[in-house]
Amino acid sequence: MAAEIAQTLDRGLRALSLLAAEPRGITMTELARRLGINRTVAYRLVATLQHHQLARRDTEGRVFAGMGVLQLAQGVEPLLRAKASPVLRRLAEDVGATAHLTVREGDEAVAVAVVEPSWTDFHVAYRVGARHALDRGAAGKAIRLGEERSGPEYVVTHGELQPGASGVAAPLLGVSGLAASVGVVALGELDVTVVGDTVVRAAREVAARLT
């Protein structure tokens, strides 16, 4: 027998998940349609989410996830690091490059877990909290790739964030409500024919640990 659930809370959480998955926002009509409710109920749900800063509306009436979601996400980051760190450690040691888990925050990519290789003489210094635009660097572009769900399995960039540095990243797929990527960054060139597949496997393993 299925457990009883609170219908209003369930609708609110489903609405929040839809907003989190739509960085360009969503109309109230579309939100109501996708939730299977009428517009009056949708307005009440959004008003409640706005009251808790979990949603916002622009001047055209489109609804977005609110800044309060980021505050909730801060409590999730330790869990993400704990789940991803063992995989990132193996990836860093196997490739000989700095490995990272990066998530989307608005229009930026933010590193939430970073592991540096122990045996290399030189490696890229990359810190937790480092952020950059989604359209620059392998990590951000891989997140976009995951949202499009099409094209190659990984992204390769050269010198976009740091002169002389190369990056390879793959999107984290199948984790509800999380737009993220796993990747490596190194000084000089990387053998992408090998590193690309290694990064994809690591991304799949992190996703499996989070689901």
Image (cartoon, rainbow, N blue to C red):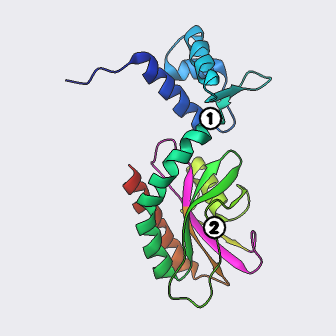
Magenta span of residues = 159-181
Quadrant including the N terminus: top left
Pointer 2 local density, CA inside 10 Å: few below 14, some 14–19, many at least 20? some
Sequence-first tag of 2 and 1:
1
Give the amino acid at mark 2.
Answer: Arg
Q: How many marks?
A: 2
Identify the residue shown where x is 66% and y is 55%: 109
Residue 177 position within the rendered picture, expressed as x and y whole percent measured from the top left: 51, 41
Give the amino acid at mark 1.
Answer: Gly
Residue 90 position within the rendered picture, expressed as x and y whole percent measured from the top left: 43, 75
Kindly identify which residue carries mark 2.
127
Magenta segment main secondary structure: loop
Kindly identify which residue carries mark 1.
68
Is residue 177 visible in the rendered image? The answer is yes
Residue 55 position within the rendered picture, expressed as x and y whole percent measured from the top left: 64, 28
Residue 21 position within the rendered picture, expressed as x and y whole percent measured from the top left: 57, 38
